[in-house]
Image (cartoon, grey):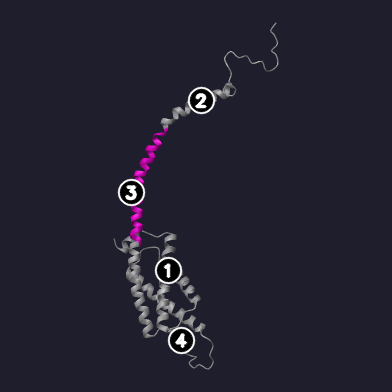
């Protein structure tokens, strides 16, 4: 069963959609930040990592409802790499100290464009990460289908077992009925509250007037 056929039958709920999006955003941001820092030789501000993860999460959450093919995953990774590259460059420029004497103050747009080395690293990261995520995607959806199939197979025997257990409950009803009837009789007659002998005479209360 391919991804397209499986996606028509299997849909991710809200929890699984959020979990897949969070994992994808975390891996994409971490790999992109590592490649960017290795190519630029400069560290990244922490807020760029948080903003990159949150932005990737928001962008991929609507697309995480079904299984995706490998080309689709690689395409999303390439788009994410370019967006994260721009964000990381902007963060590095803001983190640099002010230097009025430095030339090239009109090169902001050029610096935001990736160089050959950085572009190659981002491209390699996207393809490698796409291959790994696609294998994880297939494994995750295989587990989902297997769990649903197992739950469906166990539902029948479990229902039959519960039906058999409830069917034996009427065998206990005659004993329960006898105990209930005995308690009701004792409540109506007053017996059972104070043990009395058959020949005992109760003299409590006012004397009964003699009949003329």
Q: Residue under circle 3?
A: 153
What quarter of the picture does the N terminus occupy? bottom left
Give the structural element (helix, strand or loop) at label 2.
Answer: helix
Of the residues under marks 4 and 2, which one precedes in the sequence? 4
Give the structural element (helix, strand or loop) at label 4.
Answer: helix
Left or right: 47, with 71 as reference point: right
Disc 1 and disc 3 in contact, CB within 8 angstroms: no
Q: Residue under circle 4?
A: 109
Q: Is residue 141 magenta?
A: yes
Residue 119 lies, in percent from the top left, at 37, 82
Quarter location, residue 203: top right
Of the residues under marks 3 and 4, which one precedes in the sequence? 4
Q: Residue under circle 1?
A: 60
What quarter of the picture does the C terminus occupy? top right
Give the structural element (helix, strand or loop) at label 1.
Answer: helix
Residue 123 lies, in percent from the top left, at 35, 78
Q: Disc 4 and disc 2: Cα gap in Å?
A: 93 Å
Q: Disc 1 and disc 4: Cα gap in Å?
A: 27 Å
Relative depth, front residue between 73 and 169: 169
Q: Disc 3 and disc 4: Cα gap in Å?
A: 60 Å
| Residue 127 at least partly seen | yes
Of the residues under marks 1 and 3, which one precedes in the sequence? 1
Start and end of the magenta stretch?
Answer: 140-169
Query: Badge 4: how crowded within 10 Å, few (<14), some, or many (20+)?
Result: few
Disc 4 and disc 2 in contact, CB within 8 angstroms: no
Disc 1 and disc 4 in contact, CB within 8 angstroms: no
Q: Residue under circle 2?
A: 181
Of the residues under marks 1 and 4, which one precedes in the sequence? 1
Relative depth, front residue between 27 and 144: 27
Discs 2/1, front: 2
Query: Badge 2: how crowded within 10 Å, few (<14), some, or many (20+)?
Result: few
């Amino acid at each position: 069963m391919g991804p397209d056929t499986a996606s028509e039958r299997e849909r991710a709920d809200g929890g699984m959609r959020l979990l897949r999006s969070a994992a994808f955003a975390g891996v994409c941001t971490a790999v992109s930040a590592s490649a960017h820092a290795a190519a630029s030789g400069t560290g990244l501000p922490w807020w760029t990592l948080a903003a990159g993860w949150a932005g990737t999460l928001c962008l991929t959450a609507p697309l995480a409802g079904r299984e995706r093919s490998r080309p689709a995953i690689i395409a999303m990774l390439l788009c994410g790499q370019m967006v994260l590259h721009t964000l990381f460059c902007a963060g590095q420029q803001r983190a640099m100290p002010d230097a009025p004497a430095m030339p090239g103050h009109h090169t902001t747009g050029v610096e935001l464009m990736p160089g050959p080395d950085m572009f190659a690293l981002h491209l390699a990261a996207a393809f490698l990460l796409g291959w790994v995520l696609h294998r994880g995607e297939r494994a995750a959806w295989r587990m989902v289908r297997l769990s649903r199939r197992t739950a469906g197979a166990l539902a029948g025997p479990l229902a039959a077992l519960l039906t058999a257990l409830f069917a034996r409950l009427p065998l206990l009803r005659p004993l329960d009925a006898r105990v209930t009837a005995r308690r009701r009789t004792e409540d109506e007659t007053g017996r059972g509250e104070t043990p009395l002998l058959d020949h005992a005479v109760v003299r409590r209360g006012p004397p009964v007037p003699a009949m003329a």
